[in-house]
Image (spheres, rainbow, N blue to C red):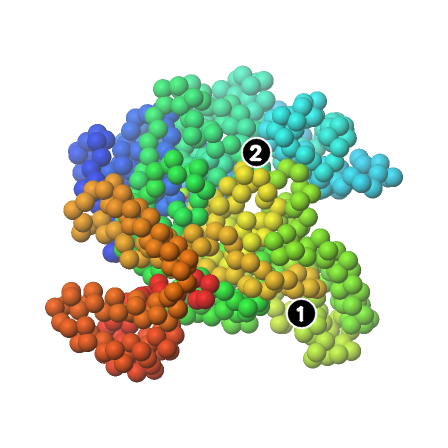
Amino acid sequence: MLLAVDTLDFGEDEPKAGQSSQPGLGQTSLDVSSTVVADSPLLRSLNPEQVAAVTTDANRLCIIAGAGSGKTRVLTHRIAYRSQIEAIDPRRVLALTFTRKAASELTRRLRQLGLRDDVSAGTFHGVAYAQLRARAAETGRREPQLLERKVGFVAKLISRGDERTQAFDVVTEIEWAKARLISPQKYVDAIRAAGRQPNVDPQHVANLFADYEEKKQRMGLVDFDDLLGLTASELRRDRRWGEAQRWRFRHLFVDEFQDVNPLQFALLKSWLSSEADLCVVGDPRQAIYAWNGADSGYITKFGEHFANSQTLTLRRNHRSSPQILAAAEAVLDPSMSDLEPLIATRNPGPTPTITAYATDLEEAAGVARAVRDARRPGDTWSNQAILTRTNGQLARFEVALRASSIPFRTRAGSDFLERPEVKKLFEGLAQAPSLRIAITDLELELEVADDAYSGQDDIGPGSDVGSGTAGPVDADDLDRHTTIGILVEMAREFLVLDPDGPGSRFAGWLHTAVGSDRSGSITDAVELSTFHAAKGLEWPVVHVAGLEAGYVPLAFAKTHEALLEERNLLHVAVTRAERVLSCSWAQRRTFKSSASDREPSPYLDELARAAVVSASDTIDLRESAQGPQEQLANLRARRAAAAGDEANQSASSVASLSDRRREAVEQWREKRAAGSSVTPAAILSDEHIDALVAAMPTSVEDLIEAGLPPVKANRFGESILQALTLATPARTR
Ligand code: ATP
Ligand code: MG
């Protein structure tokens, strides 16, 4: 089927103003036919490496590249381009990814390219479930019934007297095994080989796992993972049906391929006929699902899995400012440095900021203020996102944004009052004759459990988590307690207003104070998301909040592997930002009923240093005569030198904060004066410098207030502020 090229709508996929997608830059040796480029508008908005990736004929193609390098753009453009030249039929394309959100993002981008509803895009689970249902309808069999309450189901398998075995732990183990294609019989050997130490005796898990499979089958139920395994075996078992499916989808594309686990990989192989083509894109630096069995080896060793394959890379980042890119690179584990860093193509932007707030409440209010301040005239709220490591951390920001009348949307749709744990408690409280007594009981209960959460660096029973992995399963536990704590706090707030109020009145008050979930209907809203759910997405302004040890990395992350993934997660969060990145953390945070002192995330120093250095060393690829590699080498050398300088400075502790700030402004003045061939005093008098250093200004208005003439403040304000910020250690900002 030939696409009508005239109807292609590039929408926001077109290069943005001030953004370079310079085909001439750092010419690659890739063979790209110029007639191809000239012929297709689809290729005009791509850089040469992207054009090569879109136009290559390879039928086993792997693209490994960093965040914001255009992997998803290449994937969607490749589908559109190959449809346009009739190399593929878009109705036979299956575009796969891992979350529903990511699948709808893919669909949105494909629509922008004029592919409307031709292409099928979905998650592995979604496609498998649809195939199984269609199969059941064809054969007159019953549709697979999904087992939804796994923990409850497993709880019934555990004998009554056995209080030590938690159903939740057993389910975690079952999921761990199934993602890796491990049967109950092989479970014990497999965990030994993996060095995994579950909370429950391994043989006991293996027995419960076998009972679980047997009972599930007997009742005609399937769990989420079975959907994948069943589809794969059905495709093999029934050759004719299998062939029909493989014919139906004979062009397979997978986004975020670093997240594929053995079970999904096995299904992918069952979907793939020898004539079919496969294109995968991904980034091992964004591998964040190892806890779920994902194995980034499938992408890094693609050639070993598929003979005669081609692997390409993309080296330019088209999303983030050079400062943000440098910050993102700095938080990665050193083992990731094998992979070539990206080259920034966007214009320099403001230096990322790090703000330490006294408490978590102040952080939430401060971030809400920052959201409002960052909104420039004509901007939409949806230009901004607040990202946190865990879902529970978002609750504070929901409350603060509501209080500031800023519209927001939660990515998971889990609005505060809609969370199951909050809902359940809330229903209980609403019926309490005396809210005061009910709340006191609840606080006492929370205090008992507090012991496990007391240490600032150990906010969860992480030391007991033998696996050392740190997926959302662990984080959820933490989340539950945080959200419950917030509910208790709000009840206290209500009791100040209405000391003897019954629970029913509290319920009414809370609904008006917090509001009900209207987020779904709001179109222009600030996005609230966890790091996990933000993958693949981007916003001009990103606030990464709650950056404390215990959250980033999560307290449960103990092993090297888990810590590496925590760094990847922060990398994912930071690389969502295009222009502005503000990071924050709180020195004191309330968990349930008690507050504890917090330390900043250990990765913040690296982030701050890299961002600051990069701010004075931004690469402007369009103006420089140097090749990208040369520029990169220079940038690295300058970073290394600056890192050394910084170490010397802190060792001798000579320069006081105001000396450093004065020096920074003086240096800026020198540079500016030299550039304009005037004396430094003509740019800024010494008196003005004195006033600025003393005033700690943060805006152009502050500069005017400190005595700088408005003409100068408007002309030089932003760069003076930048110089002052650079000279201020991250933690005092
Ligand atoms: P992630 O790893 O975060 O999923 P990605 O590699 O998939 O990122 P994209 O989302 O495809 O990157 O692209 C990042 C941004 O850069 C998008 O806004 C995209 O439209 C833009 N972009 C990509 N390539 C170009 C280009 N050649 N010219 C202009 N903009 C581009
Ligand atoms: Mg992408």
- Residue that protrudes farthest toward the right in the picture: 161
- Disc 2: CA contacts within 10 A as few (<14), some (14-19) or many (>=20): many
Relative image position of residue 713 (x, y in whole percent): 27, 76
Answer with the quarter of the image where residue 79 lies. top left
Let me know if residue 383 appears in the view: no
Left or right, residue 7 beside residue 101? left
Contact? badges 2 and 1 (CB < 8 Å): no
SS for tag 1?
A: helix
* Residue identified by numbered label 2: 293
Residue 194 lies, in percent from the top left, at 61, 29
Residue 450, label in figure: none
User: Which residue: 49% across, 61% down?
Assistant: 584
Amino acid at dot 2: Gly
Kindly report the distance in space between the C-alpha atoms of the residues bearing marks 2 and 1. Answer: 39 Å
Q: Is residue 563 left or right of residue 340?
A: right
Kindly state the secondary structure of the residue where label 2 is placed: loop
| Picture mark count | 2
User: Is disc 1 surrounded by few (<14), some (14 to 19) or many (20+) residues within 10 Å?
Assistant: some
**What residue is shown with label 1?**
490
Q: Nearer the viewer, residue 27 or 105?
A: 27
Q: Is residue 189 visible?
A: yes
Location of residue 82 by image quarter: top left
Q: Which quarter of the rendered image does ligand 2 occupy?
A: top left
- Residue 662 image-quadrant placement: bottom left
Q: Residue 90: x, y in percent?
A: 37, 33
Q: Earlier in the sequence, mark 2 or mark 1?
A: 2
